[in-house]
Image: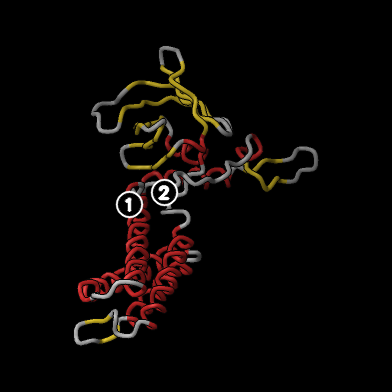
Amino acid sequence: MKTDMSGSVRMAGDVGRGVEVHIHLEEETLTLAAAGGGDLGTWPLDAVGIACKPDGFHLRLEGEEIVLRTEDDAHFALALGISAPTTRLARQMAILRDEASAEMVVDVTDGMTSPFPESVLDDPPATPRRVDRLADGLPYLGTLVVVAATLAVVASIVAFASGSAISFPGDIPAWPAMAAASLVMAAGGFAAFQDATQGRLSIAGGVALGLITILFTASRLQEEGLAAEAMMGFTLAIVAAGVLLAIDTAGRNTFAD
């Protein structure tokens, strides 16, 4: 995968076209050079956060966010293996794929047609890569939430053993609600391994139930000792799961079209 093209680059938030640059893309690196000469820098692709947005490709380089526009956005996106383009760019990429599929190479030796398009034979196909570590959400959301849910389950068991030490108004034991919140969170964590959307909804439900339980029981807890520690552990587990879900949601929204 070697791609050379022209384009322009500007800092995110700036107006105007920006600085004209030459773009050189290889298997593992991206190089930007000023149109008048001189490299602006070379970066490993694994260290570059790339998000496709309507105003161009947003790149995170060394803590800064820049906006890159190219003369051929579709070829650039295909070379990088971008899997979540804008609607306009998706259409352009689909046209390129259709054209590539139609370009069949005729083998003059035996008169047979090769099943591979010319572009595939010239250059190896780009390997799809995750554009940004948070573009698809928190990578280990499911695992971390399951750990938090495990702590909440332990706290629920201690609450059960404590009787009415942790209870709702009217001395209604709180451990069933604590257990339910823990199990819903755990189910969401396991579901996130297979379906991130369903997992996130379940995690949010468990966190909401846990926060309601904390709201109605924490102020009634008078005893110190094991019951208080169980309530503290349950609170930490619920808050941690909520923070993890917030980070996951923020990552998805930041790099959305």
* Amino acid beneath label 1: Ala
Work out whether residue 11 or residue 53 is closer to the camera in this orientation and state it.
11
Count residues near mark 1 (Cα–Cα under 10 Å), then give few for <14, some for 14-19, many for 20+. Answer: some
Q: Mark number for residue 129?
A: none
Name the disc covering residue 250, or none.
1
Quarter of the image for residue 57 reads: top left
Q: Percent from the top left, x then y, of residue 153?
A: 42, 74
Please rate how many residues cluster around mark 2, counting C-alpha atoms within 10 Å: few if below 14, some from 14 to 19, many from 20: some
Helix, strand, or loop for circle 1?
Answer: helix
Residue sticking out furthest to the right: 110
- In the image, is residue 154 above or below residue 13? below
Asked if the residue at tag 2 contacts the one at tag 1, i.e. Cβ–Cβ closer than 8 Å, the answer is yes
Q: Which residue is denoted by mark 2 in the rendering?
A: 134
Is 37 placed above or below 201 here?
above
Q: Is disc 2 placed on a helix, strand or loop?
A: loop
Left or right position of 149 against 204: right
Residue type highlighted by circle 2 = Leu
Q: Measured from the top left, where is residue 234 in percent x and y?
A: 35, 69
Classify 142 as above or below 9: below
At 50% from the left and 64% from the top, the residue drawn is 193
Which quarter of the figure has residue 10? top left
| 60 over 5 or under it: above or below | below
Percent of width and height locating residue 215: 22, 71
Report the Cα–Cα distance between label 1 and label 2.
8 Å
Quarter of the picture holding the N terminus: top right
The answer to which of 180 and 160 lies nearer the viewer is 160
